[in-house]
Image: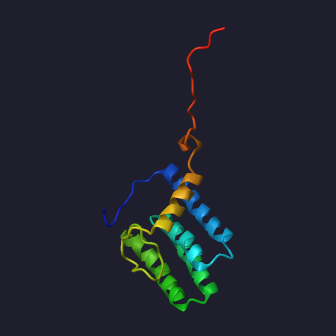
Amino acid sequence: MPRYVKTAPNPAGHQRQAAAFDYLLAAFQASAGQPPAQRWPWLEAAHVVGLNRLALQWRAHWHMLAYARALGDGFEVRGQWARLGLTVLGHLVRRLPQGNTGRAIVPAFRSMVPGPLVRERITQAMAAVAPASAQPGAGVSVDSGPKHP
């Protein structure tokens, strides 16, 4: 797996990426009342999805900061403040560690493979925002041949 990846512009892909990101944040908001171990992966998945776009990555860290503050997790709060600054730097120098989940408990510049729950949530979000033509069975019709009267 390449350590750092720069992707070519793709407007349709950017729209789907932003929609998946918004889906993950909405799911995080909808998970209110669940334990932190069930809620953090929504934000981690949003971070992974938005990693290559400054605005999305910034929003992911901002939401992580707000959640850490709500939990009273000082370590995570400090880590998220640091990552907000590092986000700008990383985008300026184009050094973004693929797969990094964005939490303070992981090194900020380490590429990684996200855990199964984070990957599952990314898959769920991407499926939810897939174009209708990409949905299973979409655009497929079963034709038994010409109809004869």
The answer to whether residue 52 of the structure is visible from this angle is yes
Q: Position of residue 132 (x, y in %)?
A: 59, 43
Residue 102 x/y as whole percent: 47, 75
Most distant residue in the top direction: 149
On screen, residue 38 above or below 78:
above
In percent of the image, x 57 and y 81: which residue is there?
65
Residue at image location 54% in from the left, 91% down from the top = 74
39 with respect to 96 (left or right) = right
Q: What x and y, as percent, mark residue 133?
A: 56, 40
111 with respect to 57 (left or right): left
Q: The N terminus appears in which quarter of the rendering?
A: bottom left
Which residue is depicted at the point 46% across and 72% down? 101
For the point 68% across and 68% down, the residue is: 30
Image: 137 above or below 5: above
- The answer to whether residue 54 shows anywhere in this view is no
| Residue 17 % position (x, y) | 52, 57
Q: Quadrant of residue 41?
A: bottom right
How many numbered discs? 0
